[in-house]
Amino acid sequence: MYVIAEIPSQATTPELYKIVSQHMIHGPCGLANPKSLCMQDGKCSKKYPKEFSEQTVQLLDGYPMYKKSNSGSSVQRSGVILDNRWIVPYNPYLCCTYSAHVNVEIHSSVTAVKYLYKYVYKGHDRVMASIQSDEHNEIQNYVDARYMSASEACWRIFHYDLHDRSPAVQRLAVHLPGQHTVLYKDGKAVEALQTSKDTTLTAWFKANQEIPETRNIHYHLFPEHFTWNV
Ligand SMILES: [Zn+2]
């Protein structure tokens, strides 16, 4: 069983039960905790509680509906009883190895590309921290702070590369006159579009105009002789 979304047996797997109870429960949110960070417009943005299901079903959108049996097993969190519908999918081996929250999902449709893309460009690791004072109870702010581990800090300090391309591939633009892709910021003057930057194609035309020796180099071979600086 690679992915489970149910409360494990406390009798047969006490260690896993402890870890899942601590780390793999969503909420409470909804009516029990309307101020939960996942709540948007009065609903849980993560769509918890999920539905009970006696078996895992593959839905059309690529996401499965995990087996969440209505077995009566539950755990208590922040004074609220939560059943299988509130369990975040996990892999027992990973949870026990790291003794931490490790969400594992099955995704099998072609939209997996979109899912992976989102993760790659999600940005830095972040932590949601709550600062509270028991004595005065004045400080109760949630801080959406950037989290940087020691290894990432060292990487930055030593100015190591943050990305690399292998093999380095440059897509050469092909477009009709005045129909190249232009990126501009919302609210920026439209005039900026007229003075937009060159594409690889317009830069190639310009090079042909300005440097006669380049005229016998085909477009696709141009990068062998010239560097494209955006
Ligand atoms: Zn929620």
Image (cartoon, helix red, strand yellow):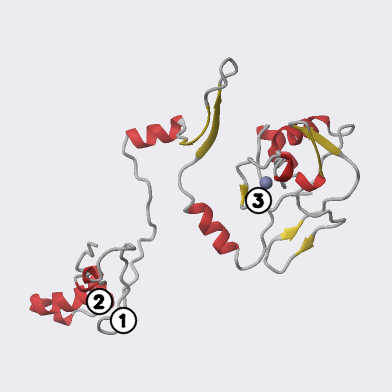
| Quarter containing the C terminus | bottom left
Q: Residue at x 83, y 53 (%)?
A: 52
Q: CA distance from mark 2 to mark 1?
A: 8 Å
- Mark 1 crowdedness (10 Å alpha carbons): few <14, some 14-19, many ≥20: few
Q: Quadrant of residue 146?
A: top left
Q: Residue at x 68, y 32 (%)?
A: 99
Give the answer, above or below, for where 184 lies relative to 173: above
Q: Which secondary structure, mark 2?
A: helix
Name the mark on residue 42: 3
Q: CA distance from mark 3 to mark 2?
A: 50 Å
Is residue 225 or residue 39 the one in the foreground?
Answer: 39
Name the mark on residue 201: 2
Residue that sits furthest to the bottom in the current view: 176
Q: Amino acid at mark 1?
A: His
Name the mark on residue 175: 1
Q: Amino acid at mark 3?
A: Gly
- Which circle's residue, 2 or 1, is located before the other in the chain? 1
